[in-house]
Amino acid sequence: MAKTKVFVSHPFADNPIENRKKVDKICKDLVKQGFIPISPLHLFSFYENDSDREEILQFCYELIDICDIVHIYGTSEGCMKEHGYAVLTGKPVEVKV
């Protein structure tokens, strides 16, 4: 049986170091609960700066499409766009803020 894939929507740019620590913990907790976390913060860490935000957001939408549920952990612009996209496409959403 396939495990549930959870898209982890979390702020990043306002405090990269602390936000990475928070998402590390969230992902570890999700794994302990039997889920597969899909974390854009981890997946796209190779991007050097915020100038590629729109391209990353398009990747995030595609990842939301393949996930089973979206967890929202913040109210940043990116989180709100991901939340809106998930709702628009009928993806289940849990707001964890």
Image (spheres, grey):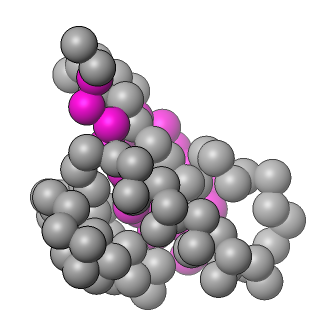
Of 74 and 7, the residue lying toward us:
7
Outermost residue on the right side: it is 48
Where's the C terminus, which quadrant? bottom left
Residue displayed at 57% across by 74% down: 57
Q: Is residue 24 among the parts visible in the rendering? A: yes
The percent position of residue 74, horizontal first and vertical second, equals 32, 70
- Left or right: where 81 falls relative to 45: left
Can you tell which quarter of the image residue 51 is in? Answer: bottom right
Where's the N terminus, which quadrant? top left
Residue displayed at 80% across by 73% down: 49
The percent position of residue 50, horizontal first and vertical second, equals 73, 78
- Left or right: where 51 falls relative to 12: right
Residue displayed at 20% across by 75% down: 87
The relative height of residue 25 versus residue 52 in the rendered view (above or below) is above
Of 28 and 91, the residue lying toward us:
91
Magenta stretch contains residue 73: no
Magenta stretch contains residue 8: yes
The percent position of residue 83, horizontal first and vertical second, equals 29, 74
Q: Is residue 29 among the parts visible in the rendering? A: no
The relative height of residue 32 versus residue 39 in the rendered view (above or below) is above
The residue stretch that appears in magenta: 3-27
The percent position of residue 88, horizontal first and vertical second, equals 24, 80
Residue displayed at 46% across by 79% down: 78
The relative height of residue 61 versus residue 84 in the rendered view (above or below) is above
